[in-house]
Amino acid sequence: FDRLFAPTILLEASSCFLVIASSQSYTFEAGMALITWFGSYFLVFLMSVPYLVPSEMSDRSNCPTANTTLSSLCESLPSVQVSSSTGQSQDYRLPGATNSSDSIALTNVFGDGRDGEVVVDFLHTVVVNSYTSVKGNASEGSKSILVTSSSIFRVGGEVCVMQMKGSNAGSSMYGRVTKISKNTMVLNEGLTFNCSTHGDVNRCQVITVPHFSKVTMKDHATLTGRPWDGYVGGVIVFRANKEVHTGPYGSRISACSIGFRGGLGGKTRGLAGLQGESFDGSQSIAHTSNYDGGGGGPVCHGYGGGGAGGGHQSSGDHGTAYYRNRYGIHCTQHSAGGSSNGHSSVSESILMGSGGGGGGHGSQCCGLPGRGGSGGGIIIISTPVLVGEGLITACGTSGQAADHTFHKSGGNHGGGGGGSGGSILIITLRKSTKGLFGVRVGGGAGGQSPAGYHGGNGSGGRKTFIANIFLGSAMNSYWL
């Protein structure tokens, strides 16, 4: 057949063999066969998925015209939705599909493979993205963006513009570079939000988006991103139009600890810790939270408290700070955990994990308080096939333990708070059953203190895993 639409094929015989041939041999690369026994009968279900059908095709005017097979498939379907990690269906605009386009191509979703195959070898660590900061303000609707350096871009290449901190934090868009003039780049689409880098808070960056054909991870290989430095970094984003192989167990695509930075411990005796970095607000020496950044460990009667954990999916844990001396003096003030933030689906708003607060510096001369852990970064992967046993992770870093090495009584400094987990968005046609890879966005643990003034744990992050394209409702759907 050229195309076959059949939810089930029931062969009523004690034994039989069924062969289905397709005019396009590659269509079975994303296929699946399920066999269920019914006594002497059995059910054969052969699923072939040659094309992805984006959610925009629920509007018939958006059916693509360049590919007749995909166009006819689109015309015949009542609606298309996607399933997320929540188990519920939702309409979803895939990254790369634009509002102004009246035809949706698969290259908008999985790329065109122009950057070829990338292989990350045994024990190697590779960064696949380049980053630059936006200078000043770029208004919504503008196609021109002034950047710190345009040397990383090429005409025709894809970029992701992402507001990391301040107003519109979590907003992002994709576009193609049409012109480069000194440090000004021009996109094919106008910005969908106000993008700015100014003052102590607002930070917007532009990231290259590679279009690989395949990504292959070898044993104990790592694909990562540039750590966030206050202006750029913290994001891994790419497309692969054939396959992403996460490799054997021990390899990883990792954005762990490249997100918002943890606060420093108190620098001198009696000084509280610095708050963890957040998507909004400036860090300061305070036990209160910095939005989702953990509060710094306080100092009370010479005893340093633990820094608080960063928040993301939920609030971070408070740091520990309690002391009662022989005179009955109580210290119950503790650092406040970072607040929860972000959208339940990272397709709506995507943020890095926040930093944990630094520990308070006690009155004793020796040793040091712990630094807060950094948050996890952001991972965005678009590929039709995802296989392998390697990890995809954007975990927060654990807070640093207080150092009391040179103090006989154990010291009185606080541990650092743990950073919160980051965000992961994966869009794929099929997750292979050949490999059981893990997707993790856990928060970091609080740093320990021999005196008992431990840092708080960071919150877990957020992830949306879109692996099934289906019709109808979430509970009554037909597989393509």
Image (cartoon, rainbow, N blue to C red):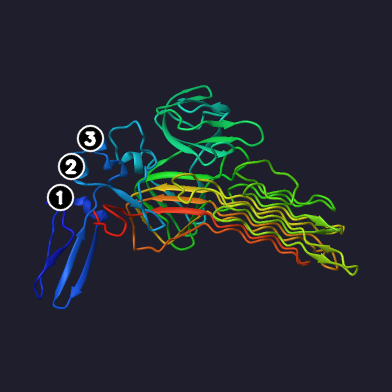
How many numbered marks appear? 3
* Furthest residue toward left: 13
Q: Name the spot of residue 361 as percent of width and height, x first.
A: 80, 55
* Furthest residue toward right: 327
Q: Name the spot of residue 439 as percent of width and height, x first.
A: 46, 58
Q: Name the spot of residue 161 as percent of width and height, x first.
A: 49, 35
Residue contact at pointers 2 and 1, CB within 8 angstroms = yes
Front in this rendered view, residue 408 or 326 = 326
Q: Is residue 433 left or right of residue 403?
A: left
SS state under label 1: loop
Q: Which mark is residue 152?
A: none
SS state under label 3: loop
Front in this rendered view, residue 178 or 94 = 94
Residue highlighted by disc 3: 66
* Furthest residue toward bottom: 39
SS state under label 2: helix
Q: Is residue 37 left or right of residue 164?
A: left
Label 1: how many Cα within 10 Å (few below 14, some 14–19, many 20+): few
Residue highlighted by disc 1: 3
CA–CA distance between discs 3 and 2?
11 Å
Asked if residue 13 is positioned above or below residue 31 in the image, the reply reads below
Q: Which mark is residue 72?
A: 2
CA–CA distance between discs 1 and 3?
18 Å
Identify the residue shown where x is 10% and y is 74%: 15
Residue type at tag 3:
Ala
Q: Is residue 78 left or right of residue 382?
A: left
Identify the residue shown where x is 12% and y is 64%: 18
Residue type at tag 1:
Arg
Q: Name the spot of residue 180 as percent of width and height, x first.
A: 47, 24
